[in-house]
């Protein structure tokens, strides 16, 4: 699925109804919820080991890749929810009852990964912060 907007992020998360204490929404979907991006291509979540095992047991999970840096497997559910256990301890804030990675934490993660797509997201975060500062000054 492509071009998932803010409303659709919430619809997807509510559809699956995972235990809200066992996951945090990270990266692109969190950027959408913080109004930094209009759309994302999937919903990345970081899950507890408990939920990780439940997802593998109860869903038709498709292996996406092995992350050597963090030593974890990353999976997809229905080609739309991407999950692993890495980054479960990121800073988050609660939006509509769901944990979403904070903007500062997203920036830190994107700078650490520093892939081409991350560089674009870093720029968007910085631009959004500058816009916020301008609004505050007025």
Image (tube, rainbow, N blue to C red):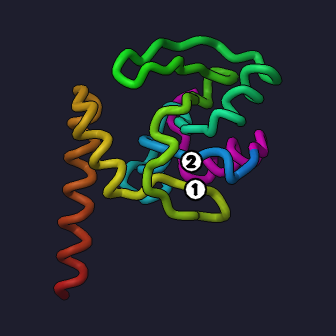
Return the residue at label 1: 99
Q: Are marks 2 and 1 in contact (CB under 8 Å)?
A: yes
Residue 71, above or below 82: above
Near-viewer residue (117 or 109): 109
Return the residue at label 2: 24
Q: Quadrant of residue 17?
A: top right
Q: What SS does tag 1 mark?
A: strand
Residue 109, above or below 34: above
Q: For residue 11: magenta?
A: yes
- The span picked out in magenta is 1-18
Q: Residue at x 71, y 35 (%)?
A: 50
How far is disc 2 from disc 1 in space, using C-alphas?
Answer: 5 Å
N-terminal label among 2 and 1: 2
Q: For residue 127: magenta?
A: no
Give coordinates of residue 75: x percent, y percent: 59, 20
Q: Seen in the image, is 54 located left or right of residue 108? A: right
Looking at the rendered image, the quarter that the N terminus falls into is: top right
């Amino acid at each position: 699925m492509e071009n998932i907007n803010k409303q659709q992020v919430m619809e997807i998360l509510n559809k699956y109804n995972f235990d809200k204490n066992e996951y945090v929404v990270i990266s692109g979907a969190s950027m959408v919820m913080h109004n930094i991006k209009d759309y994302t291509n999937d919903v990345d979540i970081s899950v507890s080991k408990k939920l990780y095992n439940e997802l593998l047991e109860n869903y038709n999970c498709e292996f996406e890749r092995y992350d050597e840096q963090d030593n974890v497997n990353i999976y997809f559910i229905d080609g739309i929810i991407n999950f692993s256990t890495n980054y479960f301890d990121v800073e988050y804030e609660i939006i509509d009852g769901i944990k979403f990675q904070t903007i500062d934490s997203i920036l830190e993660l994107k700078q650490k990964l520093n892939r081409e797509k991350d560089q674009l997201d870093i720029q968007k975060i910085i631009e959004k912060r500058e816009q916020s500062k301008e609004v505050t000054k007025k």
